[in-house]
Amino acid sequence: MFHYTDVYALRSILENKKIRMTDYRFLNDRDEYNKGITFICRAFKLFDEYPDKFPLEMRESVKTALDIFESQGLGGGYFERSIFVASFSKTKNSLSQWRNYGSYSIEFDVDNLRRERNHPEITATLVCYYYHSESDGVDHAVSIIKEKIIPSLMECNVDDLGFAVEFLILDLMISYALCFKDSSFEHENEVRIISLRFLSYFPDVFFRERQGALVPYVELDFDLTAIKGVMLGPSDNQESSLISLSMLILKLNSSGESKPFKITVDSSKLPYRG
């Protein structure tokens, strides 16, 4: 996976070994989560392909969770939650990404990045689906229910979960609602790591300023062995930027603060001045 960013964030990510996960309400497309909720809810109302072994009690819990989901969203009171998102792309050298997000692309090993020691509350890794119509979005939501949500619930023991089964269903619905994006963003080829967090216990939420507003975020820690390489995007000063980037990586590798790592450095050959 590739994370596109500017030079300031690149330096912070490399030196601090942290990625910021932003509250979903502050993402570029304000409407995308609400669309995801709509698609998931409509799909569950249409869904009738429950396996024979799917417990009747679980079906009732799905109905209860759906009622909560439609009326309260992420919940209220003690159960109020938020989702934090770190965005990546499956495309290494994308002109649109260089234009929109910065002149550096960091390649991550997703399995290494998602290790529990890095962040114990990572909920899921989602490949975004770019819907072209309302019906397309609902159809994809039906496939998520059939291929992702129902199999996850089948692995659970209803008796062991008790009342918590509704919240497990809610967590799955909430998480997958964030994989839907309008087709106008299709060029981003986005993959997301998400963390679902209770607001009643939020000791590690930070805030940064953006356009006069405070943006909440949490930090995803990682070891530099999680980075495979860094690509410098199209620019007029690629040669000098590559030299300084290589020097920074050499310095970090010799500091003894991290396990020995190998990060390749490369530059885009796209004919664009940036």
Image (spheres, rainbow, N blue to C red):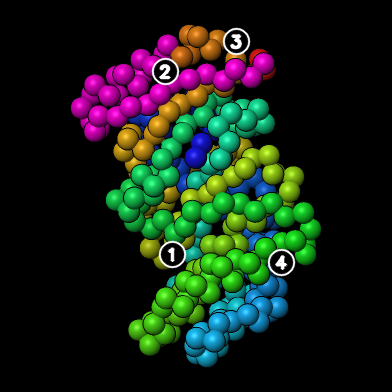
| Residue wearing tag 1 | 198
Residue at mark 4 to residue at mark 1: CA–CA distance: 28 Å
The local secondary structure at tag 4 comes to helix
Residue shown at 70% from the left, 44% from the top = 185
The residue pinned by badge 3 equals: 236
- Frontmost residue, 216 versus 213: 216
Q: How many C-alpha atoms fall within 10 Å of the one at disc 4: few (<14), some, or many (≥20)? A: many
Tell me the CA gap for discs 3 and 4.
45 Å
Q: Is residue 28 left or right of residue 23?
A: right
Q: CA distance from mark 2 to mark 3?
A: 15 Å
Q: Amino acid at mark 4?
A: Val
Q: Is residue 7 above or below residue 68?
A: above
Range of the magenta residues? 243-271
Q: Secondary structure at mark 2?
A: helix
The spot of residue 181 in percent (x, y) is 67, 52
Point out the tag, 2 or 3, that comes first from the N-terminus: 3
